Amino acid sequence: MKIVITGGLGFVGNQVARHLAKAFPHAAITAIGRTISPLDSKIFQDLEYLSSDLTKGRDSFSWLKGVDCVFHVAAKAGIGGKFDDYNLANFEATRDLLDASKKFGVKQFIYTSTPSVVFNTQNIQNGDESLPYLNSPVSPYAFTKAKAEKIVLEAHSPKKFQTISLRPHLVWGKDDPHLLPRILAKHRQKKLRIIGDGQNMMDVTHVSNVAHAHICAFQAMLQNQDFGGKAYFIGQNEPVQIWSWLNEIFKNLQLPNLTQKISFRNAHSIGFVMEKIWGLAQLTTDPPMTRFVASQLAHDHWFSNKAAEQDIGYYPIICMQEAMDKTLPWLRTL
């Protein structure tokens, strides 16, 4: 069995690779990435690495020859930058990878998506897969991921080309390059504020559970060649009051409690202004605030795992307390 993982040296992709190596010890696993000289710590025994730019078009995917399954984890994440850059990396690259996968006879295609594809700037409580896609490009990342997810699911062909999409929410854990390190940096700089009333609930999903969900999806596809064509939310089954959860982390790291607040309305207005400034100046960095981020940080958004439990047998393999115990020692080094 040959398996490739795009973004295979990234935070989620590398954990998927490690879980795959344990679940399928005789599989040949190749990580795909753009880095020419990757960190040795990311390449474990028997993991091959190949440098390839997914945005170069479908003719650049000759490495798919003989591959059985593709885990497409690579994506451009962020809240700033040009829409065209997100569209190229998230939609066009996925489209070309899908086409090339079918051309080379790949059997399974597992896409790592995000719950942001359905976020509608309103509270979502115990949301399920019937939620409609967002229809506004207010978040280039979420909008282009939604476009890509649609074509992935539409490409499903029973017994010929199985596709599935997984939507893990706010992935965290040791070596997380985005979520908690950025929050801690802002808090230390005294630039972090509670947005809204601070009572909103969110899913935060440990990376081990996210990787496990990918294995569950692959096993379900191997067991039933008709299975696929659907998206699934992946969470912990333990939504947290996000600002209280962060304050508990701050306490464990001997950092001051966060109490300063800003109303959602004011944060949303600031986000609008920041978007305009960054757009006019053509800045590629992430602005301090956007309308989409303000909406996410001020509203409930947590989701049901019921469909994933029923269809792919996914259940979290570590609980929130164990996940925190595993992550805190690393956070203390930041």
Image (cartoon, rainbow, N blue to C red):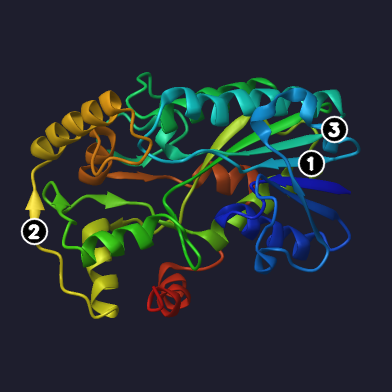
Q: State the separation of the CA atoms marked 1 and 2.
A: 48 Å
Q: Which secondary structure, mark 1?
A: strand
Which quarter of the picture shows residue 272? top left
Disc 2 marks a residue whose amino acid type is Gln
Which quarter of the picture shows residue 141? top left
Q: Which secondary structure, mark 3?
A: helix
Q: Nearer the viewer, residue 253 or 58?
A: 58
Q: Residue 292: where, in percent of width, then height?
A: 28, 34
Residues at circles 1 and 3 in contact by the CB criterion of under 8 Å: no
Check the image and report above or below for 256 versus 295: below
Residue topped by disc 1: 69
| Disc 2 crowd, CA 10 A, few/some/many (<14, 14-19, 20+) | few
Q: Residue 116: where, in percent of width, then height?
A: 40, 36
Describe residue 298's horizontal placement relative to residue 230 as left or right: left
Which residue: 29% across, 63% down?
185
Disc 3 marks a residue whose amino acid type is Ser
Which residue: 61% across, 21% down?
151
Instruction: Answer whether residue 316 is visible to the viewer in this image.
Output: no
Instruction: Answer whether residue 203 is visible to the viewer in this image.
Output: yes
Check the image and report above or below for 138 versus 309: above
Residues at circles 2 and 3 in contact by the CB criterion of under 8 Å: no
Q: Give the number of the mark in front: 1 or 2.
A: 2
Q: Which secondary structure, mark 2?
A: loop
Q: Nearer the viewer, residue 235 or 65?
A: 65
Residue topped by disc 2: 260
Describe residue 27's horizontal placement relative to residue 298 as left or right: right
Q: State the separation of the CA atoms marked 1 and 3.
A: 14 Å
Residue topped by disc 3: 62
Q: Nearer the viewer, residue 217 or 52?
A: 52
| Disc 1 crowd, CA 10 A, few/some/many (<14, 14-19, 20+) | many
